[in-house]
Image (spheres, rainbow, N blue to C red):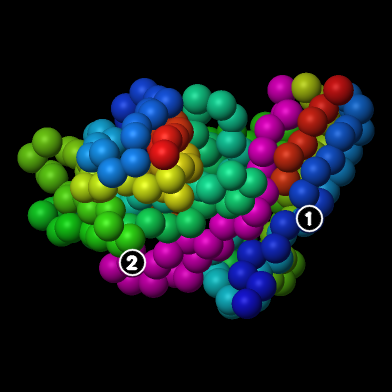
Amino acid sequence: GNSVTQMEGPVTLSEEAFLTINCTYTATGYPSLFWYVQYPGEGLQLLLKATKADDKGSNKGFEATYRKETTSFHLEKGSVQVSDSAVYFCALRGGAQKLVFGQGTRLTINP
Amino acid sequence: NAGVTQTPKFQVLKTGQSMTLQCAQDMNHEYMSWYRQDPGMGLRLIHYSVGAGITDQGEVPNGYNVSRSTTEDFPLRLLSAAPSQTSVYFCASSALLTGDDSEAFFGQGTRLTVV
């Protein structure tokens, strides 16, 4: 079945550092890929998405590229801010609209 | 802009009690779903619905019931609460679009503790 694997957390960085959160997936067919972000005490919000191979999703300085050859969708940001502290979830959408999530990566940015 | 509204935000139950978690959306979305979030396990799908009168099981349906009598509402029922159901529950909705390009909107969650 479909599955998503994220890098183990938690991740702690200093402000303005470069961020990478790894995400790989297993799926049949050609799923759409997503990154969701969860700020403390809130629900999940869509951060970015890509619906086909080689698509790059981007939002708020974050980017991720749909790599079919490596089945990956790594999240990157060039210079993180304290306000980026949150839990990040990689997800794929397979059949029947079902979202399958990774285990989440808690990111803390120190000033 | 209400979006997806979940109630209650917090609940403590005793083992064996039953309760209903409410979820309502005002975006006329066909697709609604319930997830539970547990540490280190991400979100796991409990039940989902593609429209009024249609529901189906997700990955972890045991101990939960759902119904979808209207497009707007998708309540989740715990029949006989168990400590293993202690979790944070999220309701989500999205439009059913071709091309798989629809965004899922999430409620703020219900933190449930079963003692």
Taking the spot 53% from the left edge, 62% from the top edge, the residue there is: B105
> Up-down: is B87 above or below A91?
above
Taking the spot 45% from the left edge, 50% from the top edge, the residue there is: A83
Q: Secondary structure at mark 2?
A: loop
Taking the spot 13% from the left edge, 45% from the top edge, the residue there is: A67
In the rendering, which numbered label is found on residue A95?
none
Taking the spot 56% from the left edge, 26% from the top edge, the residue there is: B39
Please state the horizontal and vertical placement of residue A16, each as a whole percent of the image.
28, 44
> Label 2, label 1: how many angstroms apart (C-alpha)?
28 Å
In the depicted view, which residue is nearer to us: A11 or B92? A11
* Chain ID of residue with mark 2: B
For the residue carrying disc 1, how many other residues have a C-alpha within 10 Å: few (<14), some (14-19), or many (20+)? some
Identify the residue under disc 1.
B7
Q: Is the residue at mark 2 from the same chain as the one at mark 1?
A: yes
Please state the horizontal and vertical placement of residue A63, each as a whole percent of the image.
23, 53
Q: Is residue B104 magenta?
A: yes
Identify the residue under disc 2.
B101
Segment colored magenta: B84-109
- Where's the N terminus of chain B, which quadrant? bottom right
Please state the horizontal and vertical placement of residue B11, each as a whole percent of the image.
84, 40
Residue B19 at least partly seen: yes
Sequence-wise first label, 2 or 1: 1
